[in-house]
Image (tube, rainbow, N blue to C red):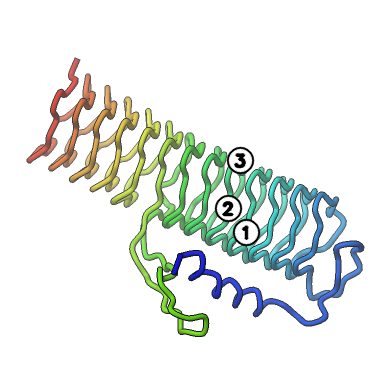
Amino acid sequence: MSRARAVAPILLALIAASCGIGSPDVSIGFEVDRSGYRYANLVGQDLRSLEFAGRDLTGAVLDGADLRGVDLTGAILDLASMVGADLAGATLVGVQGFGLNLSGATVTGADLTGANLRDAGLLETDLREASVREANLDGAFLGGADLRRADLAEASLVAATLAAADLRGLDLGRATFRGDFTTVPQEVSGFFDTVRFDTVVKVATFDGADLRGAVLDGVDLTGTSMVRASLAGASLVGTVLDDADLTDVGLENADLGSISLIGSDLTGAVLAGARLADTDLSGVHGWRTSLAGADLAGGTFALADFTELDLS
């Protein structure tokens, strides 16, 4: 059975559990009861005058809606869609947004403290200066998202995808990128069969991400992928990047003191001027890696392969 068919019963169960018989139709007017706006069609509407704090917007469609400065504290946004919506300055503290689609939305300066955005879609989302402290972004898709000057302290991004995301200058040292992640099993034999969830260790990925000047000190990124990512001038002191794919990564002038790169792939990586003092490079694959001007004092290179190493 395909993964999509395996997930279907679970999603249907989620939807069925959140549905209520006789829920009001809010696709035309805004007179609804206080239970919420479940599955409402509010596409392109100016919603700034409405109260959404604590409301149930499960499955609602708010694509392109104007929600600037709106208070959504504690709202339920599971499986809702806010594609291209304007949430600048909005308050989303503690919202429940499993599978919420915020792709292309403007969320600048918004407060998402403690928000649950597990498996949310945030492709090309503008999150500049947003507070994402203590938020759950496990499994979220943040490809192309702009997170400059955002606050991710204590946020969890286990298994998140940050391909081509703009993370320049961010302090990510207090965020979590690797840990236990619950997944749906690949095979379910029947619709009514008991679904057993699997828990595996996953890590966020950063292919093509812009991390110039970012701080990742002490972060565990074992097994991550940072193919063609830019980390020029970044600080990765004590960071764990064992078994990571760092192909063609740019680490010019980065501080990699005491970093662990055991078994990592540094093929084509540029570490010109980088500080690698006391770094463990055991078993590293460094074909055509550039280490021109790098500080390698006290480094460990047991079984490392630096074929065609560039030191010029």
Q: Is residue 227 left or right of residue 82?
A: left
Q: Is residue 123 above or below residue 72?
A: above
The residue that disc 1 covers is: 100
The residue that disc 3 covers is: 128
Q: Position of residue 274 (x, y in %)?
A: 27, 27
**Label 2 or label 1, whichever comes before in sequence order:** 1
Kindly state the secondary structure of the residue where label 2 is placed. loop
Q: Which mark is residue 278?
A: none
Q: Position of residue 308 (x, y in %)?
A: 15, 23
Q: Residue at x 79, y 64 (%)?
A: 40
Q: Amino acid at mark 2?
A: Gly
Choose mark 3 or mark 1, whichever is in front: 1
Q: Is residue 8 above or below residue 127?
A: below
Q: Position of residue 241 (x, y in %)?
A: 27, 46
The residue that disc 2 covers is: 121
Quarter of the image for the C terminus: give it: top left
Q: In the displayed image of the protein, which residue is found farthest to the top? A: 312
**Label 3 or label 1, whichever comes before in sequence order:** 1
Kindly state the secondary structure of the residue where label 1 is placed. loop
**Label 3 or label 2, whichever comes before in sequence order:** 2
How far apart are the alpha carbons under marks 3 and 2? Answer: 16 Å
Q: Position of residue 29 (x, y in %)?
A: 92, 63
